[in-house]
Structures are given as structure tokens and as C-alpha cells.
Image (spheres, rainbow, N blue to C red):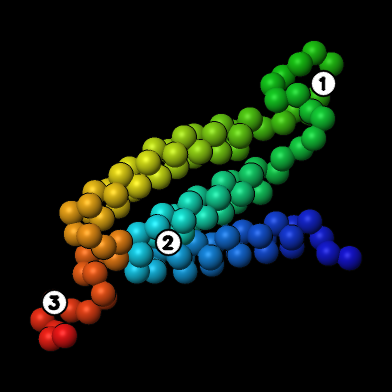
């Protein structure tokens, strides 16, 4: 039987591999999707290292000796907000690049060839 740790580690690895692969592609939309997958992998990693517990209060309460650590949840919430802002900025920059160059290639060349190459 597979353990939960192996499943979480595999999910983080797959998200990271997919994010790196897409971030290294030549089109801006694929780069944006790659950065988004990388941010999901980081969020999942932060949750995994935070040793989340179920049915425990997030803060100290009377009569409760064990409580959940609120730090991983705060870190992930902050990461989600930063990721949203970063994604919005990258989408606007890629749209501006597309409107100025007429191509969604990362290098700005429409057919992917060097500028010095003859057709």
C-alpha cells in the first residue's frame, strides 16, 4: 500500500517537472502555465513540510494541549497572493510583447528562425 508521503512527494515532483518543462518552452502562454505549475508545487511543498494536523485548533485554547501550527497556512496564503500578482504581471507583459512583435515566441521572432537567416 502506498503511503501518503510518497503520494505527496510524487505530486510535488510531477508538478515541478511539468512546470520546469513548460517554463523552458518557446511560447509565452506555455511559460505562464509553467510558472503557475511551479507555484502550485511550492504551495504543496509548504503544506507538506508544515506537518498539517486535522481537528486541532489553530491557536491556543483552554483545555487543549496540542494545537496546529498556523505558520504553513499563512505562508501558503501569502504565496497564493504573490503568485496571483506575478501571473497577472507576466500575462500583461506577454500580451504587450505579442502586440508589439506579432508573435507569441519568447524571442519575439515569428517563425522561430534567427533574424540573420535568409528565407
Question: In this image, 64 relative to 8: left or right?
Answer: right
State which tag comes first along the sequence, 3 or 2.
2
Neighbour tally class for label 2: few under 14, some 14-19, many 20 plus, Cα within 10 Å: some
Question: In this image, 49 relative to 57: left or right?
Answer: left
**Tag 1 and tag 3, C-beta contact below 8 Å:** no
Callout 1 secondary element: loop
Which residue was labeled with disc 1?
A: 64
Give the label, 1 or 3, closer to the camera: 3
State which tag comes first along the sequence, 1 or 2.
2
Residue at the extreme bottom: 118
Location of the N terminus (image quadrant) = bottom right
Residue at the extreme top: 62
Question: In this image, 25 relative to 56: left or right?
Answer: left
The residue sitting at 42% across, 61% down in the picture is 30
Camera-side residue: 55 or 83? 83
Q: Which of the 4 image quadrants contains residue 68? A: top right
Camera-side residue: 33 or 7? 33
Answer yes or no: is residue 25 visible. yes
Which residue was labeled with disc 3?
A: 115
Cα gap from disc 3 to disc 2, whole angstroms: 23 Å
The residue sitting at 30% across, 44% down in the picture is 92
Which residue was labeled with disc 2?
A: 30
Answer yes or no: is residue 86 visible. no
Camera-side residue: 111 or 9? 111
Q: Which mark is residue 89?
A: none
The residue sitting at 54% across, 34% down in the picture is 77
Q: Residue 8's spot in the image, x, y percent?
A: 70, 57
Callout 3 secondary element: loop
Q: Residue 97's spot in the image, x, y percent?
A: 23, 54
The residue sitting at 60% across, 38% down in the picture is 72
Callout 2 secondary element: helix
Amino acid at each position: 500500500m502506498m503511503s501518503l508521503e510518497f503520494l505527496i512527494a510524487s505530486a510535488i515532483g510531477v508538478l515541478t517537472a511539468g512546470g520546469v518543462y513548460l517554463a523552458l518552452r518557446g511560447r509565452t502562454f506555455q511559460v505562464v502555465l509553467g510558472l503557475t505549475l511551479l507555484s502550485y508545487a511550492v504551495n504543496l511543498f509548504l503544506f507538506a513540510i508544515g506537518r498539517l494536523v486535522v481537528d486541532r485548533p489553530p491557536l491556543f485554547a483552554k483545555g487543549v494541549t496540542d494545537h496546529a501550527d498556523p505558520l504553513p497556512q499563512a505562508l501558503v496564503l501569502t504565496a497564493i497572493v504573490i503568485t496571483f500578482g506575478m501571473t497577472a504581471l507576466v500575462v500583461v507583459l506577454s500580451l504587450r510583447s505579442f502586440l508589439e512583435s506579432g508573435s507569441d515566441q519568447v524571442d519575439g521572432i515569428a517563425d522561430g528562425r534567427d533574424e540573420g537567416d535568409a528565407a
